[in-house]
Image (cartoon, grey):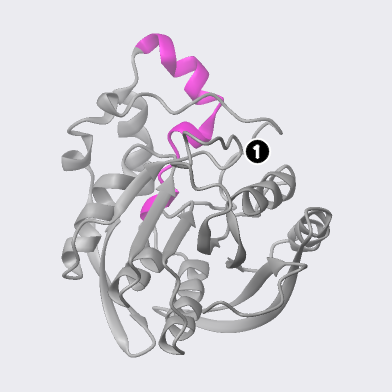
Amino acid sequence: MSQSVARKSSASKPMSKSAPSALWHGLDAHLSRGNRTVRVGDTTFALNCLEDMEEAFQQSFKALPHEGRAIAAGNAAELTPHFGVVWPSAVGLAEHVQQFLDAGNSPITTLELGCGLGLPSIVAAKRGVTRVIATDRHPLVSQFLDRNAANNSLQPIHYQSLDWRDLNETSTLGLKQQVDLLMGSDLLYEAWQPGFLAAAVAHLLAPDGVAMLADPGRKYMDEFLDLSAAHNITCRETCLRRVQLGEAVSDVLVIELVWINFQDEKF
């Protein structure tokens, strides 16, 4: 959701950490924002979104101290505001998650990678999941997530700043292999990502958990599945969902991943 094909290419190693969130303090109030309704199954959700991507990028760039701008200019992920858009993959994933939960499955802990506006996490919280954790890198994500939780009559959703290319016990709150339902949408848009994402799934997914990833048809899915198999994780189900946002209709692939030795369904 917060990942976009429009982003500039990145190095194959973890980039420098995002600039301290204090640099963006108050910036949110100066950005053009608007509310958008999104239908997921039988439920309508209200999401606060960015309305002007160029404005958001420019304002974020200005928030940096002068000495940091040259570095940030070459590292678009530090400033990219694409987290503030409703992406078809996020809607497709949200629909899949809602159907999964409505079928009677009862994960205790969900974690969303690259949550952006947090729609799948909001769906999980709305459906009563005990512990919902939304993660992303951009320092403005938490403010949008708080607004969107409130917009949908929810208590604040726990947010964790997380770079899934550089996981450790501290950054993942000690959750190594304890996430019952791991979620992510549109996370495979650059060549370096399949390996890091496969490793992140292996790091976080509980032995009897399920990972759900949504993709709009980018070219790195097969490589990701091969690398996941090297971690003993396999795809147990695929689902093609047709998502309509306004006048645009998109096909979104949703895959479910489990450990290869997974036998009995927990939920």
**For the stretch drawn in magenta, what is the main secondary structure?**
helix
Q: Is residue 16 above or below residue 115?
A: above
Q: Is residue 160 left or right of 193 when viewed as pictured?
A: left
How far across and how far down the image is residue 56, in percent? 33, 41
Chain part drawn in magenta: 66-84
Q: Position of residue 242 (x, y in %)?
A: 55, 84
**Is 170 a magenta residue?**
no
Between 57 and 266, the residue placed more toward the observer is 266
Question: In terms of secondary structure, where does tag 1 sit?
Answer: loop
Image position of 10 (left or right of 87): right
Callout 1: few (<14), some (14-19), or many (20+) C-alpha neighbours within 10 Å?
some
Residue drawn at the location 19% of the way across and 66% of the way down: 154
Q: Residue at x 23, y 62 (%)?
A: 149
Residue 266 to residue 212: above or below: below
Q: Nearer the viewer, residue 166 or 203?
A: 203
Q: Is residue 64 above or below residue 123?
A: above
x and y, in percent, of residue 27 in the image: 22, 34
From the viewer's side, name the closer residue of 53 and 195: 195
Tag 1 residue: 9
Query: Residue 235: which quarter of the image?
Result: bottom right
Above or below, comparing residue 35 to residue 116 in the picture: below
Q: Is residue 126 left or right of residue 173?
A: left
The spot of residue 11 in percent (x, y) is: 68, 31
- In the drawing, does residue 219 fall left or right of residue 264? right
**Residue placed furthest toward the top:** 67
Residue type indicated by callout 1 = Ser
Is residue 83 shown in magenta?
yes
